[in-house]
Image (spheres, rainbow, N blue to C red):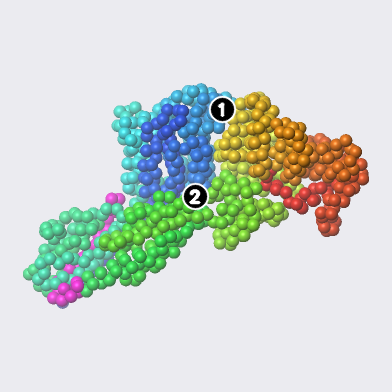
Amino acid sequence: MPKFHHVKRLCAYLLIVAAMLLSIGTAFAAVTEESGRRVALVIGNSVYKTLPSLPNPANDVEEVASTLRAAGFDVTIGVNVDRIGLEDTVRRFLRSTSNAEAGLIYYSGHGIQVGGQNFLVPVDATLETPYDVETQTMPLDLILNHLKQNSRVQLIFLDACRNNPFNAQKFWMAEKLEPVGATRGLARIDSDLGSLIAFSTEPGQVALDGTGALSPYSESFIKRASEPNKEIRQVLTDVRRDVIAMTNGKQVPWENSSLMDSFYFIPAPPPPSVEPMQQVSVPEGAATTKLPIAPPHDETGSALLVTLNQLPKTGKLSFDGKPVEKGAKMPAAALTALTYDSSGVAAGTVGLIGYTVSDPYGQATQGVVAITVSADAGAKLAQLEQQKQMRLADADAYLKTLPRDVDTTIGVGPIEASLPVVPASVAEMTFKVAALPDKGTLRAGDRVIGLGHVLEAADIPALSYEPQIGTENQPFALTLQAANDDLPPATVTFKPVLDACDAAAAAPLDLQGVTAGKLPNEIDPDDALPACTEAMKAYPEVARFVYQLGRAQLANRDTKTAFATIKKAMDAGHVRAISELSALYLVGASVPANLDKSSEIAAMGAKKGDPFALYSYGKSLYYGRGAKADTQEGLKLMLQAADLGHTYAMNELGYIFFNGVNVPPDIERGIRFYESGLKRDDIYSMNSLGMIYRAGKAVPQDLEKALELFKRAADGGQPYAPRNIGLMYRDGLGVPKDESASITWLEMGAERGDYWSALERAKMARGDGSNPERLVTAAHYFALASAVNRPGTGDPKKQSDKELASLADSAKKKAAEAFSSELSPQELKVLPKAKSLNERLVLLAKATWVKRNPRYDLF
C-alpha cells in the first residue's frame, strides 16, 4: 500500500506540474497570437506588350501568395494584368479591406516615379506620350490611402524598382507636365502610424532580377516570412542581409516603419496539446506490448519533437525494435509506436515515462505515462483495441455524413458550414485539414484555419467560411482526414454565391460592394425590390443591402421612399450612399435642388475615397458649383476617380481637356480620356466621341461611326444621345432625312430629361406657326424644356421660356388641359399658385414628368 500511495502522490504532483506548464504556454501564445482579418493584394507583371518583359515577377507573386495564405491572409492575386484588369483586381481587394486587422500589398513588376509619386505599370502600358501615365498606370498612393482608412496595419512591399526604358521623359500630372524622376527606381514613401513600407532596394536605386526563377528579394522574403514566431522587423533585417549577400552588395533593401505593435506573419500557436497524465496497463510477462499512448498535437499541424526525460525503472522500453534511452528524441508520432517488455516485472509494479513535447516555436509541454503491470491487462488492452476500432468505425461513418456542397453568401461575414456534431464516441479524436480553399477564410470560431491544421472534434461544428469577394460560381474544397488513423478523407465543397440583392442591385465601383454591379438602367425593380427587402431582414447589420434597396426604389421610380432609404444607409455607414444622396440633392429628386447641400455631402464621401464622390465633389470644386472654386483640387479628385475606373470622371476630363475648360485646350489628351471611357463601355464617353466623329474635329469625320456610338449610348440609357441621333435624321447628316425618326429620338431624349431634346422637338412642332395642333405640341415641349432645365446641363438663358411666351394662349391652354388630365385632383390642388399661364404650364409639365418618375439616377 505505501508503494501505491507514493505512486499516486507522484502522479498528482506531475499532473500539477503539467497543468502549470500548459497554463504558462497558453499565456505565451495569447501574447504573440495575431487576431482579426488579414487581407493581401499580390500583383506580378512579367509579360509586357511593348516594354521589356521581366523574367521573375509572375513566379515571384505565385510563391508570395502561397506564403501569405499560409500566414492566414486572404489573398487577391493578379498576374500579368492590363490596365482594366489592374483596376478590377485592385477594386476586388479594396472591397475586402473593410475593418481588416492587417492589409498588405506586394507588387512585383515595372514601376515608375513621376513628380515624387509611384505608379504601378500594367502589361499593356506603352508610356510613349506625355498622356500615358494618367490613363495607363495605377498610382500606388490611391491604394495605400484607401488601405489606411480601412485597416489597422498596412504593409507595403515593392519589388518594382527596375531601370525602365520609358520612351517619354515627361508626363502630365493633373495641371503639370512632370519629368520622370531624376533618380532611378521608385520614390521614397513616408509611412503613417501603423504602416510599414518596404522596397526591394533603396529609393531611387535599381533592383536586380537575379539569375534564378525568383528575384533575390522575393526569394528571401518567401523564406523569411515563412519562419515561425519572427517579428516583421526581424524578418526584414534578415531579408536585407540575404539580398546583400546574394547580389554582392549591389542591392540593399530598405524599409520605413511606423508600426505601433509587433506583427508576426506566422505567430506562435498555443503550445502542444498533451494528455498530462495517462495510465496504461500491460500484461505480466509480455515481451512486446504496444503502449496505447494518446499522441500530442498542435493546432497548426507543426512537426513536434518528443524528448524522453524519465524511463521506467523496471522493464524495457523500445521503439522500432531498439531500446530507448533516457534523453532520446523522436517525432511525436513515435509515442504511439513505443513498446514495453514486462518480462520479469512483478504484477502491480508501476513505471513512469516522463516526456517533453516541443514545437518549432520554442514552446514545450510535458506529459506523464504511468505503466502498471497487471495480470489481467491483456483483456483490458483487447478491450481498448476493440473500443478504438469502434471509434474508428464511428469516425468513418461521421466523415461520410458530412455534406458535399455548402452554399456560402459573399460579403455578409463568415457563414457557418453547419457541419454535424461529432459523435461522443469520437470526441477525443482529432482531424487534419488535408486540403483548403485557396481563396476566402476558413475559421473555427475566431481561429483562422490553415492547411495542415489540426481540429478538435468540437471545432468541426464551429467551422465557418468567409468567401473572397469576386469568387461567385467557383467551388472550393475542404478535405478533412482523421489526424492519426488511416481513414478515407471527406471533402466538403464550399460554393460562394451572391445574395439575390447583390445580383439585382449592386452599384458599380462600390468599394463596400461585392460584385461589379449594375448601371441604373440595368436594374429590374421587380427582382431587386423583394430581393433587397429580404436581404435586409436576413442581414440587418449589412448597410450595403439598405443602400441597394434604395437603388431598387429609384429604379422603381419611388424617389421619395428611395431618398429616405439611402439616407438610412448613409447613416449606417455605407459610403456609396453618401454620393447617391448628394446626387439626389443635385437634381432635386424628392427634395428641392440644392447645389450647396449636394456639394457638402459629396465632400464627405470624397474623404472616404468613394469614386463617385471623388468625381462629384471634384466637379463641384472645378466649376465652383455649390463650393468655392478650386480647379487644382477639383482636377486632382476627378483624376483619382478615373484611376479607380469611374467612367463619368473619364468623360468629364475628356470634355475639360478637349474644350480647354479652365485649362489650355489639349485635344489629344481629351480624346485619350474619352477613349478610356469607351474601353469600359461608358455611355457618356460614347456620346462624346460620337460628337467628335460627327464634327470631324481632331479626327477624320466619320458619320457612320458617330451614329453607331450615339445608338450604343442611347441603348444604354444615356439621356443626351437621342438628341444627337434625332438631329442627324432631321438634317440628313450621314442618313436620309427622316422627320418621323427624328421626332421619335427627340421625344425619347425629352422624356429622359434632356432640355435640348425637348427644345428641338418643340421647334420642329412649331414650324412656321400655321398648324394649330402642332402649336399645342410645341407648347407641350417648350414647357417641358423649361421644366427639366437644370444648372449646368441646359440653356442658362432659358430659350424655352422666351419661345413659350411667343405662342398663342389658345395653344398653351390646350397643352395645359392635356397635362392636367394626367394629374389627379389632389395632385392639381397641391401645385403652387402660378402668376401667369406660362408659369402654370411649366408647373404642370414638371408635375406630370415627375409623376411619370423619370430616371433621376441616369444623370
Instruction: Locate the N terminus and report the quarter of the image it occupies.
Output: bottom left
Residue of label 1: 131
Looking at the image, which residue is at 21% across and 62% down? 336
x%, y% of residue 556?
Answer: 68, 54
Which labelled disc corresponds to residue 469?
A: 2
Check disc 2 and give the amino acid type: Ile
Check disc 1 and give the amino acid type: Tyr
Residue extending farthest front: 736
Position of residue 748 relative to residue 283, above or below, is above
Q: Secondary structure at mark 2?
A: loop
Position of residue 701 relative to residue 618, above or below, is above
Position of residue 834 relative to residue 391, above or below, is above
* Magenta stretch: includes residue 32: no
Label 1 – label 2 distance at C-alpha: 33 Å
Looking at the image, which residue is at 55% across and 47% down? 516
Which labelled disc corresponds to residue 587?
A: none
Magenta stretch: give its range: 358-382
Q: Judge whether residue 459 can be spotted in this image.
A: yes
From the viewer's perspective, is 668 left or right of 35? right
Q: Secondary structure at mark 1?
A: loop
Question: Mark 2 or mark 1, which is nearer the start of the sequence?
Answer: 1
